[in-house]
């Protein structure tokens, strides 16, 4: 597992250009966010122009990792080491984060243009900057202190963003989320404390050499797992997720569902592969919960009356697929090829779902904004009047359903192959059932949209950039499935 | 300085530390279980000030300063703001938590939190035989364990938002002390606690803003499924 | 020399057309029509080029890696190009027909966009060189046909769409499981490789049979084999061009074609026989043939009768495959083309009757032959083909299937063929009798149910000529079956390749 996570000595020292790119990727979002708070942008091209250096830094990091597979940076003082590492996984995640972040910014600019009264929107920009930076820290960090810092910053910013719509429901949901997140982070901190106390280090690369299967590892893994599962809305700790999204602003929902919950899950997988790589029970438990999550989340989405609730509930189900990968990735008797397949499937599903879910929230937001109705029944007749938003929703839902040629399908394919090799038939059943259920809830929405007898309404026009960006993300999720070989080759780390 | 403290620990349960631990625990109890909200909040500020002393005693002056600034001043002020005491001084809302707590409810929550405490203590003792500060010699650590359990129970038991926020704060303080006890005087541990303190203060600030706003908008004081429904309608 | 661009370009014509149509505004009627026709003609030209190259022995292949050990491969081989050619030719005809049929009705952008996607998927299914690629396009076909089925937006159409999805998505999941299990057992397996699955027979007999059942079960839903046929008659609420191309050709044929691929190019005929699955398949096909015909007789409306006829006719292909022998194969392959040409003619005509005269029920057809002579001639030719009267194309396939059955020593299949021809006659001849020999309602002073006068001819030229054209081709395929590049000649070429490696 170590080489996959990049916990080993790098062969090459980073070049100055690469270090600058790293710095830019971490700091530029903060600067751009601050700048935008002072002068909120209203036009799409301004946002695009400002985002160019950020995207360039991501591209540079991507370029760097292709040549050398692993780069590390670290600063030490006294017994504290702050370490960053850039490997294939991190580079992919950073690039996808920046992409989604920029599209969300485009969308926000459009939203502000339409909605003159959005006075609080000014606050969104600095929070956007902090969120992107802290996410990048989480993807890149290789020590528990930086990870804790990134996780907490991300959590608080996420709560802050979700509150911005200012409605009472948003505040209630946000407060519940805040309490859950804070208690979750305390559990996380206790786990870290155990690790620090027992092994005397917070740097992951060092820890890999000393961690052994002993009670303290299990206890720490349990505490970390409980804390992170709460933050990642893993079933059955998902209750806070749906209300939070029901009343939040669209770009915020997109960022949150696409990236924030994934960050906690990423940490969970990473720390468990560090602490309990050979354990059997915990990953199996998580996998079984994942199977339940798929069914439960899909049924909740199927029963939903409001568009945003549907999209949010489907996140619970989609996280279930990722949980299903745990018993394949960790475990004493898993063959290397099973782990490789599951590893690829996990990341494809995570990236594909991030892109598709962001696109889907934006499409849903567009539909709600244009029709002025937030229920499914209010969508009647939209297939004629709002074809593009609906098409974006459709393309994104192809990924969600896991139908070809989307990333969701390729991910499902890899997971299915791994499960077949490992003879996990209950997981196969859950995976296939998930496809059927997700088709059920997605097409329930389309059924409404095709109704022709709906009364004609006047639809609000949308600002430029609100649909184009979402379409871009949805297509990216679709094509990622077909050209999966290229990103997957990066995931394999140095030895591939 | 470290060595001297280690020496003094040989004399187990030194007087001042025991007094400090008892005082902190008392403050925590009042803070968690007093229905008079202003009194509870003031007790929390007292708790934070005492904790500042404790950090000082544990030879971590930076943390003492941080606790003073973030715990006592920022969090305390936030909580007072949420109560409506600051900045106007006018009483905006009832000062009592009037939500009834059924006895069975209370008993089960209490039992659960005690169970958690025992499990946790056993787990830590079993997993980590050699802690940096031995609980048997450091009354603060035992006290911290008690706060954590009480705060968890209170967090699960109370419905009033402010009391939950208070419970979270006590819980956080307990965890920080436990962390210091487990990991000892490493810089890494202090940095972790420092980050944790900042986050707790920020979270309290955010929570206080929210509570005040919610009360202003809807007259709400608690999170409940049935309340969610009435708001949604 | 391999020209990888050729299959890609041929695939892309309809895909790009669909993408461009989605970006055009709804009112850009002329531009949309121009793009549609240009793309359809370009596609036919490219297919013709590919046919010539295949005749010269060059199989153009496009290949790239999707994930480790799994490639996306499109290969222009003789069997695939048959289906691809059929769908390209009929795409042009149906586009012309649809332009006339839809007139100025709303939602055309959506219709033609998804129509292009459907054709792309069908083309991809035809040229897919491994099961993974096949699966991609197969699922894409499911998704892109849904908006066409529910096109009218009425409660009927929406319910039909729901039932269509229930069947096809479930089938897709079953197919996915089968494909994944096969890959897990054998790895990537090209349809064009000579190496069959025989090496796995000894150790994995049960598993191979299970996988066969999953694959064929998943494909049989789209091929509308009994008892998995329930979606097809309901999907007839779709507009006539959709029923014509998709439910007579693209979707049901995709299922039948998939079964062909699985048996001929994946398992191999010998292995399928050795597994003992062929007899079961032949029985299932026979049941479907008879059941479809019997149900067709009971229908009182035109389109459902044609739909049940489709159910019956598509299984001829499956029946031919399950007869172990070259004549059965030739019959099956030729029928793939012949049935498409004949059935699309029938659906075109049914749509024209509905548009011009408002005829939906069979008893309303009385005397329509004199009002719409050319359409009715086309309909009659199609119906004769379905019954299998010489010299139509339908006769040729039934003849070959019969010889195949005799050669395979399965005389009961001959009985099934005779019975089904008789049943075909029972449900088609009354239609023809009504068309030509019963008095029209106008003669007794009544009116047609809903007469519209589209154009100077008997109906709009857009509606008329495609039907006449496909009828002429289906007649020609029978009359000139011996000429090079006729469906029969090409089917023989494929069958020879399959049996003489």
Image (cartoon, coloured by chain):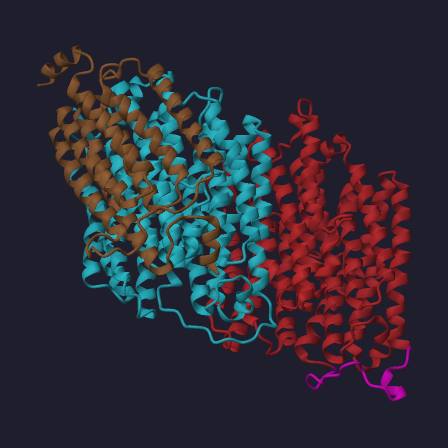
Q: Colour of chain B?
A: brown
Q: From this viewpoint, is residue C324 visible?
A: no
Which is nearer the eye, B206 or A461?
B206
Q: Would you place residue C450 above or below residue B103 in this image?
A: below
Q: Residue at x 67, y 64 (%)?
A: C157
Q: Residue at x 72, y 84 (%)?
A: C452
Task: Give the farthest residue toward the bottom.
Answer: C445
Q: Colour of chain C?
A: red
Q: Colour of chain A?
A: cyan
Q: Would you place residue A261 above or below residue C425 in this image?
A: above
Q: As drawn, is A216 to the left or to the right of A305?
A: left
Q: As drawn, is A200 to the left or to the right of C128?
A: left
The answer to whether residue C457 is magenta is yes
Q: Residue at x 61, y 59 (%)?
A: C146
Magenta segment range? Answer: C438-458
The answer to whether residue C201 is magenta is no
Which is nearer the eye, B221 or A327?
B221
């Amino acid at each position: 597992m170590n080489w996959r996570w990049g916990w080993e000595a790098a062969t090459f020292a980073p070049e100055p250009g690469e270090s600058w790119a790293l710095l830019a990727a971490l700091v530029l979002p903060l600067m751009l966010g601050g700048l935008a708070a002072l002068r909120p942008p209203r036009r799409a091209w301004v946002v695009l122009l400002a985002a160019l250096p950020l995207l360039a830094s991501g591209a540079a990091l991507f370029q760097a990792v292709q040549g050398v597979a692993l780069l590390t940076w670290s600063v030490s003082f006294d017994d504290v080491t702050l370490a960053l590492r850039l490997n294939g996984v991190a580079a992919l995640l950073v690039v996808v984060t920046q992409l989604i972040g920029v599209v969300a910014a485009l969308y926000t600019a459009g939203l502000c243009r339409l909605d003159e009264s959005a006075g609080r929107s000014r606050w969104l920009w600095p929070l956007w900057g902090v969120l992107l930076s802290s996410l990048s820290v989480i993807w890149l960090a290789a020590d528990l202190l930086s990870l804790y810092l990134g996780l907490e910053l991300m959590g608080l910013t996420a709560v802050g963003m979700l509150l911005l719509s200012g409605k009472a429901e948003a505040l209630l949901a946000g407060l519940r989320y805040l309490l859950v997140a804070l208690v979750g982070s305390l559990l996380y901190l206790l786990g870290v404390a155990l690790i620090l106390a027992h092994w005397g280090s917070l740097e992951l690369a060092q820890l890999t050499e000393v961690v052994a299967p002993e009670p303290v590892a299990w206890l720490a893994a349990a505490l970390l797992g409980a804390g992170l599962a709460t933050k990642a809305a893993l079933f059955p700790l998902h209750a806070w997720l749906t209300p939070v999204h029901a009343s939040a602003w669209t770009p915020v929902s997109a960022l949150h569902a696409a990236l924030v919950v994934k960050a906690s899950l990423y940490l969970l997988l990473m720390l468990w592969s560090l602490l309990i790589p050979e354990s059997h029970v915990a990953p199996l438990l998580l996998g079984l919960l994942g199977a339940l999550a798929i069914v439960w989340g899909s049924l909740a989405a199927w029963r939903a009356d409001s568009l945003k609730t549907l999209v949010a509930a489907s996140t619970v189900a989609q996280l279930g697929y990722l949980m299903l990968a745990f018993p394949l990735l960790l475990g004493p008797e898993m063959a290397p090829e099973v782990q490789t397949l599951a590893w690829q499937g996990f990341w494809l599903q995570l990236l594909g779902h991030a892109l598709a879910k962001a696109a889907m929230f934006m499409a849903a937001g567009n539909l709600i904004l244009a029709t002025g109705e937030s229920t499914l029944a209010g969508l009647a007749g939209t297939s004629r009047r709002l074809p593009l938003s609906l098409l974006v929703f459709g393309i994104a839902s192809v990924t969600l359903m896991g139908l070809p040629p989307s990333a969701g399908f390729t991910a499902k394919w890899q997971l299915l192959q791994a499960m077949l090799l490992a003879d996990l038939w209950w997981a196969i059943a859950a995976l296939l059932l998930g496809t059927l259920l997700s088709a059920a809830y997605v097409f329930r929405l389309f059924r409404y949209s095709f109704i022709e007898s709906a009364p004609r309404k006047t639809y609000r026009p949308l600002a430029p950039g609100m649909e184009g960006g979402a379409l871009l993300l949805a297509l990216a999720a679709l094509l990622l499935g077909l050209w999966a070989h290229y990103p997957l080759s990066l995931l394999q780390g140095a030895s591939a | 300085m470290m060595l001297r403290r280690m020496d003094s620990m040989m004399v187990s349960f030194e007087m001042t530390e025991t007094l400090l631990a008892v005082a902190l625990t008392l403050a925590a109890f009042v803070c968690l279980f007093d229905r008079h909200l202003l009194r509870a909040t003031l007790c929390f500020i007292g708790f934070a000030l005492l904790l500042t002393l404790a950090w000082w005693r544990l030879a971590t002056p930076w943390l003492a300063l941080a606790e003073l600034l973030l715990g006592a001043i920022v969090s305390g002020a936030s909580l007072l703001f949420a109560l409506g005491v600051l900045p106007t001084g006018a009483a905006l809302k009832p000062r009592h938590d009037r939500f009834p707590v059924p006895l069975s409810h209370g008993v089960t929550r209490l039992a659960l939190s005690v169970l958690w405490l025992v499990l946790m203590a056993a787990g830590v003792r079993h997993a980590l035989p050699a802690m940096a500060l031995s609980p048997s010699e450091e009354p603060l650590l035992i006290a911290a364990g008690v706060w954590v359990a009480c705060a968890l129970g209170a967090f699960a038991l109370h419905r009033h938002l402010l009391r939950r926020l208070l419970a979270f704060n006590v819980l956080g303080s307990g965890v920080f002390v436990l962390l210091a006890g487990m990991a000892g005087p490493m810089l890494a541990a202090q940095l972790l606690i420092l980050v944790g303190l900042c986050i707790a203060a920020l979270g309290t600030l955010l929570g206080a803003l929210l509570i005040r706003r919610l009360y202003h908008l809807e007259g709400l004081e608690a999170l409940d499924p049935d309340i969610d429904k009435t708001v949604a309608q | 020399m391999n020209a990888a661009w050729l299959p890609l370009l041929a695939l892309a014509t309809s895909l790009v057309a669909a993408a461009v149509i989605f970006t055009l505004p709804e009112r850009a009627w002329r531009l949309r029509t121009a793009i549609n026709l240009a793309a359809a003609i370009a596609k036919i030209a490219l297919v013709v080029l590919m046919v010539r190259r295949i005749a010269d022995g060059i199989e153009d292949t496009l290949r790239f890696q999707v994930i480790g050990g799994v490639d996306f491969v499109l290969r222009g081989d003789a069997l695939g190009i048959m289906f691809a050619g059929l769908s390209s030719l009929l795409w042009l005809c149906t586009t012309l027909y649809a332009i006339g049929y839809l007139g100025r009705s709303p939602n055309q952008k959506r219709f033609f966009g998804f129509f292009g996607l459907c054709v792309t998927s069908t083309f991809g299914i035809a040229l897919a060189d491994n099961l993974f690629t096949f699966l991609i396009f197969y699922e894409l076909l499911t998704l892109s046909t849904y908006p066409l089925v529910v096109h009218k937006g009425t409660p009927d159409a929406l319910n039909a769409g729901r039932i269509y999805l229930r069947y096809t998505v479930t089938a897709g999941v079953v197919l996915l499981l089968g494909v994944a299990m096969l890959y897990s057992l054998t790895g990537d397996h090209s349809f064009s490789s000579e190496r069959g699955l025989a090496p796995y027979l000894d150790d994995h007999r049960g598993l191979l049979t299970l996988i066969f059942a999953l694959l064929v079960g998943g494909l049989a839903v789209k091929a509308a084999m009994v008892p998995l046929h329930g979606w097809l008659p309901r999907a007839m609420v779709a507009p006539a061009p959709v029923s014509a191309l998709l439910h007579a050709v693209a979707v049901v044929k995709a299922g039948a074609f998939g079964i062909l691929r699985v048996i001929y190019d994946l398992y191999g005929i010998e292995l399928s026989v050795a597994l003992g699955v062929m007899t079961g398949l032949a029985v299932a096909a026979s049941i479907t043939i008879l059941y479809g015909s019997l149900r067709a007789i009971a229908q009182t409306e035109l389109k459902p009768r044609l739909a049940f006829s489709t159910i019956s006719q598509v299984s001829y292909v499956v029946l031919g495959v399950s007869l172990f022998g070259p004549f059965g194969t030739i019959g099956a392959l030729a029928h793939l083309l012949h049935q498409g040409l004949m059935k699309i003619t029938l659906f075109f005509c049914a749509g024209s009757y509905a548009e011009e005269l408002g005829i939906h029920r069979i008893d309303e057809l009385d005397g329509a032959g004199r009002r719409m002579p050319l359409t009715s001639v086309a309909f009659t030719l199609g119906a004769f083909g379905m019954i299998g009267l010489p010299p139509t194309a339908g006769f040729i396939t039934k003849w070959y299937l019969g010889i195949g059955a005799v050669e395979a020593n399965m005389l009961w299949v001959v009985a099934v063929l005779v019975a089904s021809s008789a049943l075909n006659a029972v449900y088609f001849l009354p239609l023809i009798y009504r068309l030509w020999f019963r008095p029209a309602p106008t003669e007794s002073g009544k009116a047609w149910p809903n007469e519209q006068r589209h154009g100077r001819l008997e109906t709009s030229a857009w509606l008329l000529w495609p039907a006449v054209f496909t009828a002429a081709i289906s007649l020609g395929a029978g009359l000139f079956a011996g000429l090079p590049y006729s469906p029969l000649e090409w089917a023989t070429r494929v069958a020879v390749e399959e049996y003489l490696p």
